[in-house]
Amino acid sequence: MLRAIARLAVALLPLFVAACGIESNDDLSTKLKPLTPLQSGTYTNVDGKDKPMILTRQGNFYDVEMKDETKVNHLRLHIYQIPEFDGYIAQFSALELSPGDTSKKHIYLFARITQGRLVLYDENIEHAVLPPQVARLFQKIGESAKKDVSAGNTAEDDKAIATAARTDKLKDGESVMYVLRVLAVSRYPLKEMLTLKRIK
């Protein structure tokens, strides 16, 4: 997952790794008040499989620094709360995207903070049977990012594409806040994907 986020930050891949959050160009930092519940410091995955990353508080967000073999990558982390969920929403944002890159600028994950550890959850958007009003907001494989203004998306259509053709990319112009709230209210099952602990 950390490698996936690093790839988003520097736009090394045209697509974000499958089943890791909700990709969107909708920026919640313009709509919600960001929180800073984590201490600045060096964090690593509890299983030790990823390289450490450095979180530095910068006002109401965190700068995330990740190093690979050849360069230092930076991205931005905002953390929010919504009434419908008992944890947090984590927003990882690319600072810039290369020309021609089709990645969305932001990735949203449900999260919880327990004893100073950041736990991130996988929504598994591509493979789940989502509520119909939410499923139709995501791009299908090969589909344009623009809103689909045509009629005819039925609940059966949504179920049919649940495990075949839906991506985790939210169509441009659609509200990521709405999607997150619907998933939270419906008690959509979340799978723990990654736990980060502070080591210094």
Image (cartoon, rainbow, N blue to C red):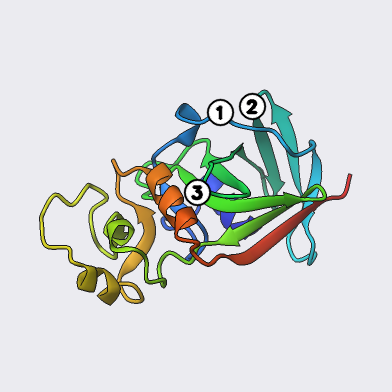
The answer, for residue 13, to whether it is visible in the render is: no
Tag 3: amino acid: Ile
| Residue 40, horizontal then vertical, whole percent | 79, 36
Between disc 1 and disc 3, whose residue precedes?
1
The answer, for residue 113, to whether it is visible in the render is: yes
Please tell me which residue lies in front, 2 or 13: 2
Q: Quadrant of the N terminus?
A: bottom right
Specify the farthest residue to the right. 200
- Residue topped by disc 2: 60
Tag 2: amino acid: Asn
Is the residue under label 1 in contact with that under label 2 (CB below 8 Å)? Answer: yes
Tell me the SS state at disc 3: strand
| Residue 99, horizontal then vertical, whole percent | 38, 41
Between disc 3 and disc 2, whose residue precedes?
2
Crowd band around label 3 with a 10 angstrom C-alpha radius: few (<14), some (14–19), many (20+): many
The answer to whether 59 appears left or right of 147 in the picture is right
Front label number (1 vs 3):
1
Between disc 2 and disc 1, whose residue precedes?
1
Specify the farthest residue to the left. 151
Q: Which mark is residue 107?
A: 3
Please tell me which residue lies in front, 7 or 141: 141
The residue shown at (57%, 45%) is 89
Crowd band around label 1 with a 10 angstrom C-alpha radius: few (<14), some (14–19), many (20+): few
The image quadrant of residue 164 is bottom left
- Residue topped by disc 1: 33
The image quadrant of residue 192 is bottom right
Q: Quadrant of the C terminus?
A: top right
Kindly report the distance in space between the C-alpha atoms of the residues bearing marks 1 and 3. 17 Å
Tell me the SS state at disc 1: loop
The answer to whether 68 appears left or right of 123 in the picture is right
| Residue 5, horizontal then vertical, whole percent | 58, 52
